[in-house]
Amino acid sequence: MSTLTTIYVDNVVGHLPEDSRGDIAAEIKATIDDMIEDRLGGLDHPADEQTAAAEREVLEELGDPAQLSREYTNSPQHLIGPKSYPVFIWAIRWVLPLVAVAAAVTNSIAFIATNDEVQIGALIGQLVGNTVIALLTAFATITILFALGDRDMSAGAADKIAGVKKGWSVDQLRATDAKAKQIRAESVLNLVFIVLLALLPLVPTSLFYVGHLNNDEPFINPELGFGWFLGYWGFLALMAIVEVVKLVRSSAKTAVVLTGAILDVAMAVFLTIALLTQQVLHPDLTSPSGAEVQQIITVIAIWAIVIWDQISTWRAHRANR
C-alpha cells in the first residue's frame, strides 16, 4: 500500500469514533486494493507509473474522505460535522460527569448549610433536580460551541473564502495523524480542567449564589494550613506537566499514562486525608448535623471521578495503541 492510500485512509478514519477506526481502515484498504487490481486488468507485472495512475483514479472515484466517512457512521452528523464529532463525543464523556459531580457537591453543601436538620429525602430531591438542570445546560453549551466552530470551519465556508470551486481531488489530500490530533485535543481540555481546579479554592461562594452564607468568602476553610494548599497546587502542577508532555509529543506512551494515573490516585488519597482529618469546607457552610454527610458525599465524589477517569483513560490508551 502506497503512502497516498495511507494518507487517504487516515483522513477517512480520522473523522470516525476511535473504537471503529481499525476495522473500517482495513475494509477501505482492501476495497482500494481490489479496485486498483481491477483497473490494471490483470497485468502480471504492471509498471509503477501504471499502478500509481490506477491508484489515483480509484481515490478520485471514492471521493472526499470526509464524505466517505459519513457513510460509515451510525447516525447523521449534521449539527456536529465529522471533523469535530470525535472530539465532541470525548468532551461530552468528560464534561458531563464532572458537571454532575460538581452540581451534586455544590448543592449538597448549600442545602446542608441552609438547613439545621438534614432530611435525606429533601436533599436527594434537590440534588437530582438541580443536577439535571446543570447537565442539560452543559450539554447545550458544548453542543452550541462545537456547532458554531464546525460551521466556521466547514468546507463550504473555506471554499468561499479561498474562491475555490466545489469538488474534490487527490491533490487536496493532506497527511494526518488522527490519534495525535485526538491526543492534542484531549490534552488541551485536560489543561483547562486543571486550571479550573487550581482556581477552585479561590472561587467566592457568591458565584454560586450562596455568598450570603459566609460573606462571599471561598468554599474552603480560611483556617486550613498553607501546606495543604501547597500540596493541592503541587499535585495539579505535576498533572499539568504530564498533559503538556502529551501535547508537545502528540502521543501518550504507556509510561506517561501510568504517571498520570499514579498522580490521580495520589491526589485522591491526599484529598481524602484532608477531608477526614480536618474541616476543609468553610465553617459557615457546614451545620453540625450535616458535617458528616458533606464529608461522605465529597469523598465519594472524589473517588467516583478518579475511578471513572482511570477507566476512561486506559480504554482510550488501549484504543490508540
Image: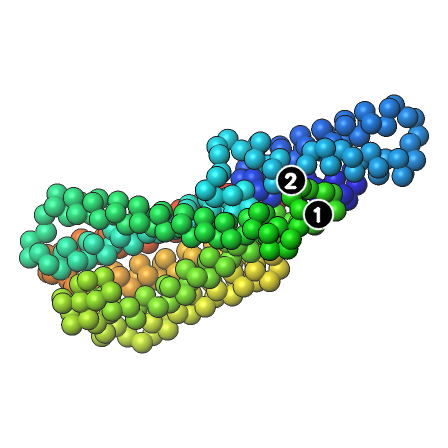
Expressed as whole percent of the image width and height from the top left, the position of residue 32 reads 74, 31
Residue 200 in view, yes or no: yes
Q: Which residue is mark 2?
A: 65
Residue lying at the far left of the rendered structure: 116
Residue 244 image offset from top left, x and y in percent: 54, 64
x and y, in percent, of residue 84 in the image: 52, 47
Per the image, label 2 sits on a secondary structure element best described as: helix
In the image, what residue occupies the spot 19% across and 53% down? 108
Q: Residue at x 54, y 42 (%)?
A: 82
Which quarter shows the C terminus?
top right
Q: Is residue 124 above or below residue 252?
A: above
Indicate the quadrant where residue 218 lies.
bottom left
* Circles 1 and 2 in contact, beta carbons < 8 Å: no
Instruction: Give the mark count.
Output: 2
- The mark found on residue 172 in the picture is 1
Q: Callout 1: few (<14), some (14-19), or many (20+) C-alpha neighbours within 10 Å?
A: few
Question: In the image shown, does 269 or 7 lie closer to the viewer?
Answer: 7
Q: Is residue 257 visible to the viewer in this orientation of the structure?
A: no
Which amino acid type corresponds to the residue marked 2 in the rendered image?
Pro
Residue at image position (23%, 74%) is: 222
Q: Which mark is residue 274?
A: none
Q: Is residue 284 left or right of residue 237?
A: left
Q: Residue at x 50, y 31 (%)?
A: 74
Place of residue 181 in the rendered image (x, y in percent of width and height, measured from the top left) = 59, 52
Residue in the foreground of this view, choosing between 44 and 236: 44
Q: In the picture provided, is 249 more to the left or to the right than 109?
A: right
Q: Residues within 10 Å of mark 2 (few under 14, many from 20)?
A: many
- Residue type, label 1: Gln
Nearer the camera: disc 1 or disc 2: 1
- Mark positioned earlier in the residue sequence (1 or 2): 2
